[in-house]
Amino acid sequence: MRLLAVSPTDLAGLHHGRDSSVGCIACHGGHDTRMRLAVRAVAALDTLTFLVGAYREPTHMKLPLRDAECRQCHTPILRPGPTGGEAPTFAAEAETEGRAGTSYHAIREHDTVRVVCVRCHGAHTTDSDAARRFISKTAVAPICRDCHKDM
């Protein structure tokens, strides 16, 4: 199981490696009451289909992750400046991301771009690595090309 791999092979494994209490339900359990109820309803239906022998491994998520699930832990995305009260800075982003001012989140023009976190940060992506924050270039490039046609 990738979640328990000694060297994380995906973002879920990296999170679990940093904090062993972070398991599947931490992200997939739902951030708010409405989503938690929806998750439980899907889990109950899956359990029922399993018990009657009709369960099939899903090919997609019935309840896609929303930004709210990610922001349970990742708020703010950019760390505050050195005094704590300052707005996030390129320097703070460089510290968190290790990519100086070229990180997507550090570029202020991206503040108005609405892309769900998991479109770029695929928790179960296996075609990337920790150094690239488990962001698959093949998944991200088409998203970037929506605005950056010359890529």
Image (cartoon, helix red, strand yellow):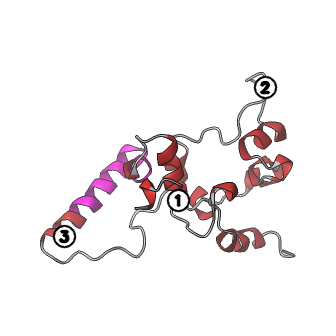
In which quarter of the view is residue 42 placed? Answer: bottom left
Q: Is residue 106 above or below residue 79?
A: below
> Residue 45: percent from the left, percent from the top?
22, 65
Of the image marks 2 and 3, the number of the one nearer the N terminus: 3
Mark 1: which amino acid? Ala
Q: Residues within 10 Å of mark 3 (few under 14, many from 20)?
A: few
Q: Nearer the viewer, residue 92 or 29?
A: 92
Q: Which residue is mark 3?
A: 50
Q: Quadrant of the C terminus?
A: bottom right
What secondary structure is marked by label 1? loop
Q: Amino acid at mark 2?
A: Pro
Tell me, yes or no, whether the two marked residues, 2 and 3, touch with CB atoms within 8 Å.
Answer: no
**Chain-order first, disc 3 or disc 1:** 3
**Magenta region:** 26-45
Task: Compute the Cα span from label 2 to label 3.
Answer: 52 Å
Q: Is residue 11 left or right of residue 95?
A: left
Which residue reaches farthest front?
A: 6
Q: Which residue is mark 2?
A: 82
Residue 123 is labelled as 1
